[in-house]
Amino acid sequence: MTDTNASRPQPAFPKASDLSLEEKASLTSGGDAWHLQGIESKGVPGYMITDGPHGLRKTEEKTGAVDLNESVPATCFPPAAGMASSWNPQLVEEVGRAMGQECIQEQVAVILGPGVNIKRNPLGGRCFEFWSEDPFLAGHEAVGIVSGVQSQGVGTSLKHFAVNNQETDRLRISARVSQRALREIYLPAFEYIVKTAQPWTVMCAYNQINGVHASQDHWLLTDVLRKEWGFTGIVMSDWGADHDRVASLNAGLNLEMPPSYTDDRVVSAARDGSLPVDQLDSMAQGMIDLAAKAAPAMSRTDYRYSVDEHRDVARRAARESAVLLKNEGALLPLDPNGTVAVIGEFARTPRYQGGGSSHITPTAVSSFLDAAGERGAKVDFAPGFTLDDEPQDESLTSQAVESARKAKSVLLFLGLPEQEESEGADRTNLDLPAKQLDLLKAVSAVNPHVAVVLSNGSVVSIAPWRDQAQAILEGWLLGQDGGRALADLIYGDYSPSGKLAQTIPMDLADDPTMLNWPGEEGHVDYGEGVYVGYRYYDSFHKPVAYPFGFGLSYASFELSDVHVTARQGNTATVSVRVTNTSDRDAAETVQVYVAPGKAKVARPSHELKAFRKVFLKAGESQEISIDLDERAFAYWSETHAGWRIEAGDYGVEVGTSSRDIAATVTISLPGDGKRLPLTEWSTMDEWREDPVGGPIMERMEALGRSGELPELPIDNASAAIFLASMPINSLFVLMGGNGSKLTNYLLDNYAQATHAA
Ligand code: BGC
């Protein structure tokens, strides 16, 4: 990186309240598809903002058109589908720093990413751009992009806020989702990143949430994002997601992108009071503040990043993104001196990113074949199939089978061709193209030592064919240097260390969201609630092909000495010793899941609440300590409209995947003590369990036994069952007028007790 031009002193920026209504309105809309609207006469620059998210996609010229594929060369880092499997936030941050540097060179003030929407269903067309089915993992990894980019003085745009989990009808669909699922599944990645890294901007989603367009959702953009989480940056619309500028500005949207040229509506709304001028000032001020923040980095016009250094970052990132799913008889790594049959067009023409707005023009691309050639490895290549939708060319099959027959082992590159996965459309099945699977069958029939290397952005079905492969390396989409990274792993310079950020199901039909996918008549019901991904599979003991968090290594590890200590305030500390029991250096990822005991709401059997990737030399051992905060034990209570921690036992599980738990320690927590006031609608059991209501109930029962009050029919077993769940205002149903007397007794005494308190 060459820093030839440190930032220059910056001019003073105007205050929004000193501008005319027209000027303020203009700031809240883009200058064109990829620029902010500046006000030259007042010294506000109209900086460029552009995609994102795994590298810079800067259109060649200043143009109003949305041109997705013509962009200046930039490093194409692994898309989130790959990076998410690294479970390495420090590495993600390094990628972020490199992206920020490329933005400075290209004079881009804000890069549009990361996209932290939950992979609700593996068919989701943008799963390759999103991080995980788990919000904790998504937030704790993607935060590195935000902190890395912003450490360079360039902004990020955390997107798509919120509940943008499918492409079908994406511009209009209403996601009907419970408050609890929102808080526990769909918002936490955003929340964590906003609270820890303050992205300069947030991009609202296209879709509606419970009938309200995200761009017009005051609750989302103002109450939650700004007031609850303390967001201080600006909110922009996704491209074309703002349908009513006045409603959006009122809701807390600072910027519509691209411009709809409707400033006049904003000005007249400010004049007629339907848009309070204070609100317009505040939205416009956000835009001025954004320009001011970007100004120092944008003044570094001579800055040049190091293309080679960034390529190396991309290679290291890719290396940690691949996940070894199967490796029978230690087929991998391959002997670098032996001849291997390399089959599959992907080995020569890698698929390393997805299609749509994230499409980057790489500075260079390495294929596996290039990389094998560079290291002098002996390979016999056969393309095996074409990447188009044409039927199989049988001569390609014969050639591949011949090559496989002669070789000691086979590397078979399979995957999803580009046209099968893109922004704008969901997939319709999880299958690899039939001609590729036929080829696998033919090849494995003549050579059992087949290692399949996969290229796909979202999950593909593996269970139906995995018996035909002795090894499987899931390469996802690995960015521009994926070929070299794969060679590093396949020839054993490094051990794979990726872990799945998404469950690989046995069958698509097992997915908990399939009953409600992709919705109908303009809405989609999130009927599975919080049971997304492994939260469902593990809670209901469903077989999966490969569980969340899973990934093999060439090394072997042992987790031991697991201790968990409950601490003040419903927190805990976990310590564990990780030992590399092999003779090669490698990394293992320790995962901590919390398993709530008995709870008042249905809770998944366990949820990821902490993780740590540990690099250990051969034979090395290290003790690590991880803190669990209050949130690790909490659920979102709709009746309390807040987080709740119940008193009781919690299992703390320490393992290497959601289904490989080395040890579980049970701790007891005091709970948060929160309770709702009792009312006539509280049940008898709720009264009994309440610290104020319980003693009143006991007194009432004693008075019943001594004849001073009517007696509850608790000796009658079936009446007792009825009573337990009965709101106290219904006691008359069982006891007639005597029931009403007891209702009044309870309410009067409670009022006195709470009044006195
Ligand atoms: C996508 C965003 C992207 C924007 C600008 C939209 O269609 O949803 O992710 O940042 O276009 O390209």
Image: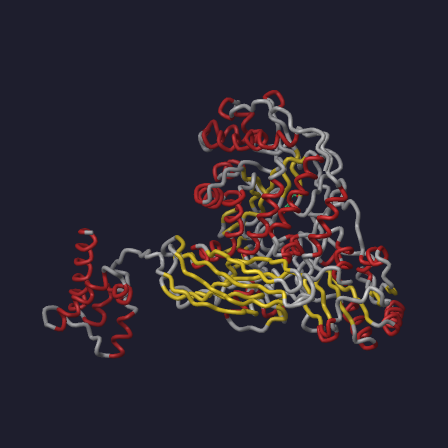
Q: Residue at x 49, y 25 (%)?
A: 17
Estimate the x, y position of residue 688 in percent, counting from the top left. 25, 66
Residue 57 image-quadrant placement: top right
Using residue 214 as the reference point, say whether residue 124 is left or right of it: right
Query: Which residue is nearer to you in this view: 335 or 80?
Result: 335
Q: Is residue 459 above or below residue 643?
A: below
Residue 400 image-quadrant placement: bottom right
Using residue 700 as the reference point, say whether residue 392 is left or right of it: right
Using residue 122 as the reference point, say whether residue 19 is left or right of it: left
Using residue 296 as the reference point, say whether residue 644 is left or right of it: left
Q: Quadrant of the N terminus?
A: top right
Query: Which residue is nearer to you in this view: 735 or 377?
Result: 377
Estimate the x, y position of residue 572 in percent, counting from the top left. 43, 58
Q: Residue at x 74, y 73 (%)?
A: 470
Estimate the x, y position of residue 757 in percent, counting from the top left. 20, 51
Residue 138 image-quadrant placement: bottom right
Q: How many marks?
A: 0
Is residue 122 something that shows in the picture?
no
Is residue 560 something that shows in the picture?
yes
Query: Which residue is nearer to you in this view: 321 or 754?
Result: 321
Q: Is residue 181 above or below residue 151?
A: below
Q: Going by the picture, which residue comes out furthest to the top?
A: 41
Q: Quadrant of ligand 1?
A: top right
Coloring scheme used: secondary structure
Estimate the x, y position of residue 108 in percent, counting from the top left. 67, 36
